[in-house]
Amino acid sequence: MTKQKPLTIIKRSGEREQNFSPRKFHASILKEALALKIPPGQAEEIAKLTTDHVEKWTKSRPTVTTADIRRVATRHLKRLHLDLAYLYENNGHMI
């Protein structure tokens, strides 16, 4: 069995960070879902499904940007909860 190389994340600032953190990603989705008053059980399920989807997507890539992750997550969230997808896609932007 070959060991998978760690995924490099390139942040918006250009800074490189090793390894995608599913726990951090899950927490960010969950936090935004709860801010929208999505029931906790549903929010947890959305965060889990989205984290699993993004984690699977990153498996075949040696390097991704935070913009890539945001785009893939938003596309997936649009299937689960449109308001949450909009909020996540526009996080940090004036809307």
Image (cartoon, grey):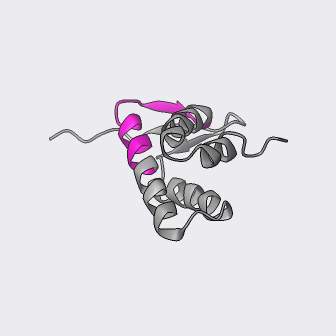
Q: Where 39 sits versus 48, above or below?
A: below
Q: Is residue 52 magenta?
A: yes
Residue at the left extreme of this rendering: 1
Residue range (magenta): 51-66
Q: Quadrant of the C terminus?
A: top right
Is 95 on the left or on the right of 50, as rendered?
A: right
Q: Where 19 sits versus 10, above or below?
A: below
Nearer to me, 79 or 68 = 79
Where on the picture, by quarter, is residue 70? top right
Coordinates of residue 60 in the picture (x, y in percent): 35, 30
Coordinates of residue 17 in the picture (x, y in percent): 56, 44
Coordinates of residue 19 in the picture (x, y in percent): 46, 46
Where on the picture, by quarter, is residue 85? top right
Is 30 on the left or on the right of 93, as rendered?
A: left
Residue appearing at x 52%, y 34% in the figure: 75
Residue appearing at x 35%, y 38% in the figure: 5
Where on the picture, by quarter, is residue 94? top right
